[in-house]
Image: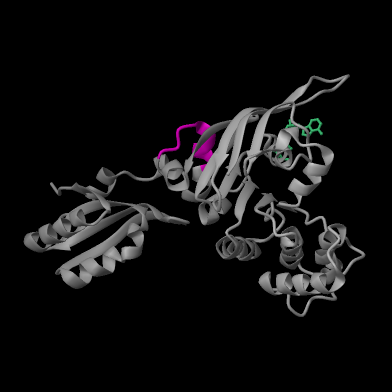
Amino acid sequence: MISIKNLSKIYKSKDKMDVTAVDNLNLSINKGEIFGVIGYSGAGKSTFIRLLNRLEEPTGGEIVMDNKDMTSLNNQSLRNERQKIGMIFQHFNLLWSRTVFDNIAFPLEIAGVAKDERKDKVNELIQLVGLTGRENYYPSQLSGGQKQRVGIARALANDPKVLLCDEATSALDPQTTDDILDLLVNINRKLGLTIIVITHEMHVIKKICQRVAVMDNGKVIEQGEVLDVFMHPKEKTTRRFVQQVMGDQEEQSPIHYFVKNYQSGKVLRLHFVGETANQALISKLVKTFNVEINILQGNITQTKDGAYGTLYVHMDGNKEEIQNAIHYIHQTSVELEVEDHA
Ligand SMILES: Nc1ncnc2c1ncn2[C@@H]1O[C@H](COP(=O)(O)OP(=O)(O)OP(=O)(O)O)[C@@H](O)[C@H]1O
């Protein structure tokens, strides 16, 4: 749906060095997906997202959205195409002298939508984002999460096909962040909207994105399915982002460290990828086989496509029961490593 080829943006400066904020970037984003772009401060994320709706003019390259080349549109066509792209911001960018209702109505006024139609649309959006009862409040009377809900409703007023989110939850506390992320997923499902999320937080990526691109120094250094990137981060920057939610895997005790502490049974390393952690494997094992299981160490995180992580357990009981339990695990999609007791 969105194809980006060799996109670049160089900020020219008379007295300072030119800055290449986006450097020959190539990406392709599918219709209806939630796509994440993650990077540290200065990586070029904001510039990139602003190039998509031409809030910034590219220095070179091509952005094709729904078969339209965004980079070659004249002013009138650009205005029309921009209506199909909504955007939300870290600091909400609301009009402080307008009520919630009037903030959401604003893009409809600009688009020349008649008053009655405007009213219906705004009420529908207020309900969609969960702001019923707050229509006549001013932004200063709202919490951060509520302000972002107004931002989302306003961005959806002209029925866009794409929603750009520039650090949309970075100013919010963790609970409110999750509420807003849930709302974005809900909107994505209900409206079939393509959502592009820019963030420096891996939590945001793992919670709502299907695919992710990692940006560094204006370039995409790694991209793929979120679960794949969690499993096999190739670049140092990506590994640091994965560590944000998984901790440092290398610092964790390997299997042989546990083995010497036990006189009987076996130590198992269970590696969950995708939906497998939802199978409640441990309780199933204890119920089905006459074994005892102690959890030794674990680090499992939930991504949009299921759980990912590793669990170390000690399994004890008679030899045959342990063997049967191990056989059972082999038949599931959980990867298993067994350390025989000496
Ligand atoms: N208008 C501008 N003029 C000159 N340089 C700019 C301009 N905007 C951004 N830059 C530079 O471009 C580079 C990328 O900035 P950008 O804001 O896109 O990164 P970012 O990943 O969004 O980081 P942050 O989250 O801190 O905004 C930085 O070196 C920044 O200083």
**Residue at the (68%, 49%) spot, across then down:** 164
Region in magenta: 232-241
| Ligand 1 image position (quadrant) | top right
The one nearer the camera, 286 or 151, is 151
The one nearer the camera, 281 or 146, is 146
Residue 143 versus residue 41 in the image, above or below:
below
- Residue 168 falls within the magenta-colored stretch: no
Q: Position of residue 160 (x, y in %)?
A: 69, 55
Residue 144 versus residue 228 in the image, above or below:
below
The answer, for residue 334, to whether it is visible in the render is yes
**Residue at the (51%, 34%) spot, across then down:** 222
The one nearer the camera, 3 or 242, is 3
**Residue at the (70%, 34%) spot, across then down:** 42
Quarter of the image containing the N terminus?
Answer: top right
Quarter where residue 107 is shown: bottom right
* Left or right for 279, reference 173: left
- Residue 236 falls within the magenta-colored stretch: yes
* Left or right for 104, reference 86: right
The answer, for residue 141, to whether it is visible in the render is no
In the current view of this chain or complex, which residue is farthest to the bottom? Answer: 133
Residue 331 versus residue 26 in the image, above or below:
below
* Left or right for 56, reference 265: right
Q: Position of residue 196 (x, y in %)?
A: 62, 48
**Residue at the (19%, 53%) spot, across then down:** 330
The one nearer the camera, 166 or 72, is 72
In the current view of this chain or complex, which residue is farthest to the left? Answer: 320
Q: How many marks?
A: 0
